[in-house]
Image: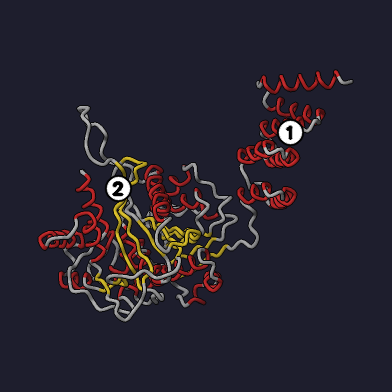
């Protein structure tokens, strides 16, 4: 598939809808929002086509004949961005077709009438023959929260990065993008794609999507009106794996929203568990998992249960379908005959989207914006928030006093608060002996960094702490012995070098140091 064909495929897949009708007058509450209340802002939307030059994509440098191939080999990434805009009585809403026309305008420039007709026909085929053409046209003309010629709202707004599901596109999240942007968020998303084309349902595919999310984070860092210090991530279906790994790999993430994602089912959990970034005990970002009974196998709760020190909210929606957690659910309820992913056409999708998006907004408000009212909403029973008891249930796991993370301990030590760091470590270690507050390697490196700064006393305490945390590591005893040796305490140095040698008897270096220390001690008698 060449680059142009790929771009067309991505855009066609990413938006199942197109219509070039007259622009509707701005509606205060867009029909697709249903019972959702828009926020205080209008919504702007833009599509940006960029390349990640740190990665190649589908075109090899040389063909099979050894001939050099011209063209851009960098990884294409098409960003879909929703942002807060100024609201006024003059705002004019854009139709749903905007999600299709904008990407093509970016890649092809101004579209001719013939090209528009071709796009319409192609999109009509994607919608399916079961949908009546009149109803299809009606939904395509439906006004959205997007406004024509938006003026950006002043101020700074947090970033939410959404990872679509397996081989899906940002158009699956139009309601979420618009709703969050109207409440003061900048929302960015890109198509789900693999290392060399379509994404694969394994760690390789998840890692490709993870790196796309990291690229988006870097690209958006200087985006106009962005609050650089506030970041949330969300993922639907397989996209939840990349989002979870994004949270585990990047401590900048404040909150992770799982939209019926596969973090607990089949290959999804397996791909996540195989990642070198899978490490749950030091997660401090908040986690929300919105889900329904899976039709993809038994749900494995291991990941969620391992989040011992992260505030975790597990919201189960009864009698829902997988696509109810994204915008397709809303559309299926509005268009008779349209049942994406082979599901059923049901009015319950409206209710599902209301619950999903209200929880999403309050979750990000609570943990990205640090809003106390939103935190209260999350702590309530679903019925207290107005949701039917037979539809939504909540498992709330809030942590009152989480232990510090590795970075916290290192910062305390570097700031001269080593006694406090030791006390905190011992308190939480007594409560949970299996807790790994810090890793052996970084703490050992910190000790030698302190030695280099002539803070040998502090280094000694760091090495003692590492021995207590990792008593089975010969390297920890070796470093502690070295610190005692630097302090001139030969007896203690011999004691701990002896332990290191007993644990690692084949190391000639330790044997040599130990013999020299013993000889030096004997010569002083």
Question: Between residues 489 and 366, which one lies in front from this camera angle?
Answer: 489
> Mark 1, residues whose alpha carbon is within 10 Å: few (<14), some, or many (≥20)?
many
Q: Which mark is residue 259?
A: none
- Residue under the point 19% across and 48% down: 5
Colour convention: secondary structure
Instruction: Residue under label 1, please give it.
Output: 483
Residue placed at 66% from the left, 34% from the top? 473
Label 1: state its secondary structure. Answer: helix
- Mark 2 element type: strand
State the image quarter where residue 164 is shown.
bottom left
Task: Inspect this view and state whether residue 430 appears.
Answer: no
Viewer-nearest residue: 511 or 279: 511
Q: CA distance from mark 2 to mark 1?
A: 51 Å
Q: Quadrant of the C terminus?
A: top right
Residue that appears at 76% across and 40% down? 457
| Apparent side of residue 318 relative to residue 521 in the rendered image (left or right) | left
Task: For residue 66, say whether it is visible.
Answer: yes
* Residue at 49%, 76% in the rendered image: 385
Left or right of 48? Residue 291 is: right
Q: Whole-percent x and y of residue 16?
A: 24, 61
Residue 295, by quadrant, is bottom left
Instruction: Give how far across and how far down residue 522 sits, in percent.
Output: 85, 19
Q: Which residue is mark 2?
A: 76
Q: How many marks?
A: 2
- Which quarter of the figure is the N terminus placed in? top left
């Amino acid at each position: 598939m060449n680059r142009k064909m790929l771009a067309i495929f991505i855009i066609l897949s990413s938006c199942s809808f197109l219509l070039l009708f007259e622009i509707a007058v701005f509606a205060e509450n867009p029909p697709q929002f249903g019972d959702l209340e828009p926020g205080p802002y209008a919504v702007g939307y833009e599509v940006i086509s960029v390349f990640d030059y740190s990665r190649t994509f589908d075109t090899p440098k040389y063909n099979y004949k050894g001939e050099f191939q011209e063209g851009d080999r960098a990884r294409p990434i098409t960003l879909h961005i929703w942002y807060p805009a100024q609201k006024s009585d003059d705002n004019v809403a854009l139709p749903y077709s905007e999600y299709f026309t904008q990407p093509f305008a970016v890649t092809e420039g101004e579209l001719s009438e013939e090209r528009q007709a071709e796009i319409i026909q192609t999109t009509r085929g994607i919608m399916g023959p079961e949908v009546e053409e009149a109803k299809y046209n009606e939904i395509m003309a439906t006004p959205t929260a997007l406004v024509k010629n938006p003026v950006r709202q002043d101020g700074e707004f947090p970033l939410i990065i959404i990872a679509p599901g397996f081989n899906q596109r940002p158009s699956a999240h139009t309601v979420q993008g618009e709703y969050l942007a109207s409440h003061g968020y900048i929302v960015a998303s890109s198509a789900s794609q693999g290392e060399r084309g379509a994404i694969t349902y394994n760690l390789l595919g998840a890692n490709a999507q993870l790196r796309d999310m990291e690229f988006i984070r870097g690209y958006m860092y200087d985006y106009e009106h962005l609050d650089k210090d506030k970041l949330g991530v969300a993922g639907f279906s397989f996209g939840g794996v990349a989002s979870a790994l994004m949270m585990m790999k990047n401590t900048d993430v404040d909150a992770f929203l799982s939209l019926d994602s596969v973090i607990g089912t089949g290959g999804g959990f397996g791909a996540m568990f195989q990642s070198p970034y899978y490490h749950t005990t030091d997660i401090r970002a908040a986690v929300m998992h919105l889900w329904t009974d899976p039709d993809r196998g038994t749900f494995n709760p291991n990941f969620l249960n391992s989040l011992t020190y992260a505030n975790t909210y597990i919201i189960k929606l009864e009698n829902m379908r997988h696509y109810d957690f994204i915008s397709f659910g809303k559309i299926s309820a509005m268009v008779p005959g349209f049942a994406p992913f082979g599901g059923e056409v049901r009015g319950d999708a409206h209710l599902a989207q209301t619950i999903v998006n209200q929880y999403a907004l309050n979750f990000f408000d609570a943990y990205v914006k640090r809003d106390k009212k939103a935190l209260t909403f999350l702590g309530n029973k679903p019925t207290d928030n107005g949701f039917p008891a037979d539809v939504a249930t909540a498992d709330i796991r809030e942590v009152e006093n989480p232990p510090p993370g590795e970075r916290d301990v290192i910062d305390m030590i570097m700031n001269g608060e080593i006694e406090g760091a030791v006390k905190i470590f011992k308190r939480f270690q007594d409560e949970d002996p299996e807790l790994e507050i810090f890793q052996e390697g970084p703490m050992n490196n910190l000790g030698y960094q302190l030695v280099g700064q002539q803070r040998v006393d502090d280094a000694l305490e760091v090495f003692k702490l590492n021995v207590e945390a990792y008593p089975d590591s010969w390297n920890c005893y070796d470093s502690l012995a070295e610190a005692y040796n630097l302090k001139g305490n030969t007896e203690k140095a011999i004691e701990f070098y002896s332990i290191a040698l007993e644990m690692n008897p084949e190391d000639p270096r330790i044997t040599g140091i130990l013999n020299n220390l013993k000889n030096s001690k004997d010569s002083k008698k």
